[in-house]
Structures are given as structure tokens and as C-alpha cells.
Image (tube, rainbow, N blue to C red):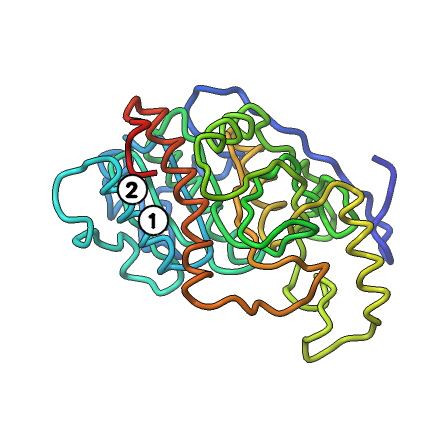
Amino acid sequence: MTSVVANSSKPVKTERKNYTGNELVYVKNPHLDSMDEDILYHLDLGTKTHNLPAMFGDIKFVCVGGSPNRMKAFAQFMHKELGLEGDEKDLEDICAGTDRYCMYKAGPVLSISHGMGIPSISIMLHELIKLLHHAKCRDVTIIRIGTSGGLGIEPGSVVITDTAVDSFFKPQFEQVILDRVVIRSTELDKDLAEELLECSKEIKDFPTLLGHTMCTYDFYEGQGRLDGALCSFSNEKKLEYLKRAYNAGIRNIEMESTVFAAMCRLCGLKAAVVCVTLLNRLHGDQIQASHEVLLEYQQRPQKLISMFIKKCLGLWNPEGSV
């Protein structure tokens, strides 16, 4: 890679994946081996204060999403769907000692909130991946379930990301490390995406499709919205950009997928992004659907992921509730 960062003489480095499949979750940090204790500060967990293998060693599926309330609801939904003992309403927040993230466990499923945007999900992922590593978890699948703005598709459509791209429609994530920019691939697991798409064919309640997902650094200017506190472009310029994005294969826009894909790929995690669209950005900027409609939309990715997990565990019943 010979390109350089704007206004910088430092070269850009490209990092490659080390995906090997059904093995322990690994980390790419030699310094961790020399640490006497690893404090997962933002999760309120640690290698000395908690028996991480006993607590999390059976985890096979990790589902992450922005909203704490949504991820609590998903954990309760999975508890019920998997037929686990006890009342799903009694699930406790494992990260209750911190107000940064929430975490719930329903059998082999871990449900965690990540907040909004690349910085917030990045912090959570660093500590989550270390948690899975310390817990000696194997063959883990991680899925981001969330909301997004659609491009040229009906509100309520569920998009399974085949490629996460940046604001220039490139399948990459730029991570600044010290004074260098490291380019990381945002390729997601294609087989997993196809499995999820195949599952969706059994759900007739809403449309599901494969498409590129564009990840931006903010909700307003970065996504071409006209309704923020700052705006320096016209409606015509906005639509020209969004139509170019659509023609490049982009079907939805959110704020986490590139760093999520890049970090999971480097640490050998099978990863997918499944988001429902709350509006068609070619028709406007503001989300105007009612609270009841939005709540039902947000449950759509959860239903799909529930079906997928139950099929993986041999628990799927076509006559069931999904």
C-alpha cells in the first residue's frame, strides 16, 4: 500500500485477517500475556475478580446492538425461545456495576449493548473479544442487530450486510494507531450471510435482502442529512450522493459496521450485520413512523437471529412462534 493520509507523510499500512475457523477466540496483542491481571473496565469484569471461563465458557453466539433496552429485550426473547428454566424477566445485567454497557446471558447466547457510533462499539469490542479469549470460548458467532436508514428500499426491510463500506464506498476501515493510519478489511463471513438469508425465506412477515452497508462517523452531516444543526450542502447534492451510493450496491446506512467487521475478522470471529431500515433516505431525513411501528420494526432482526440460533442448536420448529 503506497497511498498516504491527507496532510501526513506517514504511510498507510494494510492489515490482513488471521481467520482460522473453529478455534479459540484469539487476540492480537503480545502484551496481554505479561499482564498479571486484565481489567475489563467498561464491562466491570476482570480476570482476577471473576471466573470468566465458568461464567462465559459455553457462549456460542454473541449478539450486539446499540440500545441497552433493546438488548435486554432480545436476551429475554432468546431465554423464552430457547425454553430455558426460570422467568426471562429475572435475567440480570452482568455489567450492572457500570453505566457504559449492559450484558445479559441466555444459555449459550450473550446479548450486549454497544452504544452509538464507531468509538463506542470499538471500546466494547476490545473488551468483549478479550472476555471471550479469557473465557476460552470456541466457535463463536457474533452478530450485530440494529437499526439503519434504508436506500431505495421500503422501511421495515431487513438488510443482511454482504460488505461493509466507508463513506467513499470502499470496503475498508481506517484505524489511526499512534501517527499512522492502518487499513483494515471489512469483509464479513459470506457463508454466514447466506445462511441468514436462507433462514429469512421462512419468515413471510417482512422483506429481507443482502446488500452493502455504508458506515459513517455521524448521524447528520456524514449521512447527508439536511436537518442537523450544521449543513453546508443542498438537497440536490445530497440526493446525488445517495443515488451514487445506491448504484454502488449500498442498501442501508448506519454507524458501526466497518469497525465491527474489521475487528471480528482480525480476531477470527464469524461475524454478520443484520439491521432493519426505519425509513428510505431517498424520500427524507426524519424518522416519522409511530413508536409502535418502530418497535415492531426493531423486533424483525431479532426474529431472524432467533430462528438462525435455534436452527444451529437443533431447536427450530417450523410450527413455532417465529
Q: Is residue 3 above or below residue 292?
A: above
The amino acid beneath tag 1 is Phe
Q: Residue at x 34, y 29 (%)?
A: 136
The amino acid beneath tag 2 is Met
Res 74 label: 1
Q: Are discs 2 and 1 less than 8 Å apart at CB?
A: yes
Q: In the rendering, at what x and y percent does residue 101 appear?
A: 38, 58
- Secondary structure at badge 1 equals helix
Which quarter of the figure is the N terminus placed in? top right
Residue situated in front as seen by the camera: 103 or 208: 208
Q: Is residue 7 above or below residue 112?
A: below
Spatial CA distance of label 2 from label 1 is 6 Å
Res 78 label: 2
Q: In the rendering, at what x and y percent does residue 298 appear?
A: 44, 54
- Secondary structure at badge 2 equals helix
Q: In the rendering, at what x and y percent does residue 291 appear?
A: 43, 67
Residue situated in front as seen by the camera: 229 or 138: 229
Which quarter of the figure is the C terminus placed in? top left
